[in-house]
Image: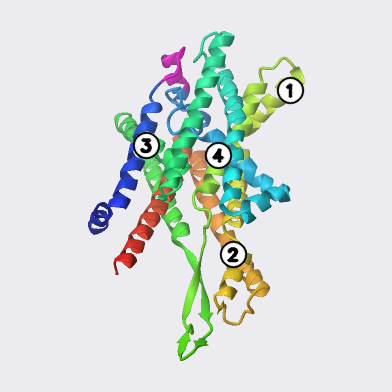
Amino acid sequence: MLEKITQIFKVKELRNKILFIIAILVVFRVAANIPLPWVNSEQLKQLFDGNQFLGLLNIFSGGGLSNISIVLLGVGPYITASIIMQLMTMIVPRLEQIYKEEGEAGRQKFNMWTRWLTVPLAVLQTSAMITLLKSQNVFGELSAFQTGTIIIIATAGTIFLMWLGELITEKGIGNGVSFLIFAGIVASLPSTVSQVFFTFDSTMFFTYLMLLVVSLVTVAGVVLITEGQRNIPVSYAKRIRGSKTYGGSSTHLPLRVNQAGVIPIIFAISIMLFPGMVATFLSRVENETVANIANGVNDLFQNQLFYGITYFVLVVLFTYFYTAVVFDPNKIAENLQKQGGYVPGIRPGKTTSEFLYKIMNRITLTGSMFLGTIAVLPLIVQGFTGVSALTIGGTSILIVVSVVIETIKQIEGQLVMRDYEGF
């Protein structure tokens, strides 16, 4: 490991990328500690103590919500907009054509529409958050001007974080949105550990022990499904040009058990949080029917059994969905055929595409079920112990471990590329 770290800082381009990302994360943490005006800080602290829903929201705001900072929404609206746009590609063929067939220009256009959609979603989520916090006396009576000011600042904060995330992504080391969420979780780690240390209760020793075991199992499970892959053998036909022979070699095509990485977890929790926020916003409207429906939705999402089942199903579905987005068996089969490669025993072209699709579906089933089980495992433990912090801890571990693994792979890939260049 020390040798790898030394290599990283020897390569000027890679070193500059890492230092740039660290600088961006510092800017993000500074913004996450600049509070909005008119906040009752004492009431805010009481509200966050033991509140699971706000704890999950705080994870996806990168820690900005616990301070009611100018970036209190974090990248949540951007994630929601990305989900909506990805789903639209499956409904609107023209969008799918723009995203997949028009190359870089099409993806840039698609990303621009995602950014535009983020703005109204940020306004809606800020309004719902203000309504929620006013009901808990975190905000006092706000005038129309004060409310509008908070909405504008929070929306601008989300756009600012979206820009920072895209800057990180452009550097080619990991996903920028995942990095921001990761930074918020890691930043809250010292205070969480110190709180557990100072409030240690010897009568809850076995509860803490179970928390440690669940954490270790979650880490091991995430590493296992992230690193697991199925190798498909690939052979290349011999080609004779003049007096030289090309090809004739054998290699393999690695299919990862979890092609989607940490994205299904982020998508699933974003979807889980969105109905609750909208319901909170609508629960205070004057129409009694709408208010009753909104309160019913709130009560439904407070039910641990419903929450756990829905969470599990969404993780499984989003694993399949995102795998379909990033893995195109038709394109892989076409590229293999162009390069003279084939899977032994499988005809090139459409048959190879169908074979890859079948194999990918099978291994994704294993990966998605395992990922979903790890996601709800803290909920199961919470049912036996009653410690609500386990849920937040489990989600945090899933994100942190996945982001760390993906980042290490990106850095190793860049090191290998430079080793080849040097050779």
Residue beneath disc 1: 290
Q: Earlier in the sequence, mark 4 or mark 3?
A: 3
| Secondary structure category for the residue under label 3 | helix
Write down the region rendered in magenta: 35-47
Q: Earlier in the sequence, mark 3 or mark 1?
A: 3
Q: What is the CA distance from the residue labelled 3 to the residue labelled 1?
A: 41 Å
Q: Around disc 2, counting alpha carbons within 10 Å, would you say few (fewer than 14), some (14 to 19), or many (20 or more)?
A: many
Q: Position of residue 128 (x, y in %)?
A: 60, 23
Instruction: Identify the residue at image location x=39%, y=32%.
Output: 28
Q: Quadrant of residue 328?
A: bottom right
Instruction: Identify the residue at image location x=53%, y=34%.
Output: 76
The residue lying toward the viewer, choosing from 409 and 102, is 102
Residue beneath disc 2: 360
Q: Which of marks 4 and 1 is nearer the N terminus?
A: 4
Q: Position of residue 324 (x, y in %)?
A: 61, 56
* Pair 3/2: label in front: 3
